Amino acid sequence: MPDQHTAILIFSRTASAELRAKALHSDRRKAGQIAEVLVERTVNLVRKSGLPWQLYHEALQRGNSFGE
């Protein structure tokens, strides 16, 4: 039984931001697909935990950096 005081926060970039930040593949289309799969895989694994979760990415960020 999950602890009622536990939740998972996922801090991620969107696939398009990940594509700009990292060279995941020399083919840009394939790199975008890889980025999408990685984000989806993370969310699917977290869902399986049964814990409440929330995904945050740069479009939801307030301030100029993660630290803010």
Image: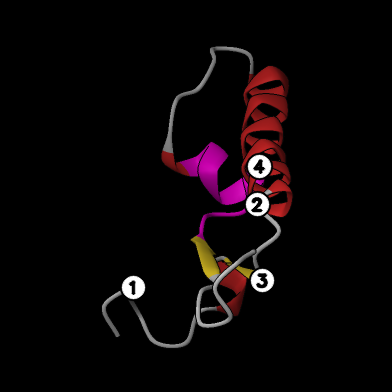
Q: Residue furthest front?
A: 1
Cα separation between marks 3 and 1: 22 Å
Q: Residue furthest top?
A: 26
As helix, strand or loop, the secondary structure at mark 3 comes to loop
Position of the N terminus, as image quadrant, is bottom right
Q: Name the residue carrying label 1.
A: 66
Picture layout, residue 67 above or below residue 50: below
Q: Quadrant of residue 15?
A: top right
Cα separation between marks 4 and 3: 12 Å
Cα separation between marks 2 and 3: 9 Å
Magenta segment: 11-20
The residue at the point 72 percent across, 23 percent down is: 29
For the residue pair 59 and 4, the one nearer the viewer reads as: 4
- Position of residue 65 in the picture relative to residue 38 (left or right): left
For the residue pair 40 and 21, the one nearer the viewer reads as: 40
Picture layout, residue 18 above or below residue 66: above
Q: Name the residue carrying label 2.
A: 49
Q: Amino acid at mark 2?
A: Ser
Q: Amino acid at mark 4?
A: Leu
Cα separation between marks 4 and 2: 7 Å
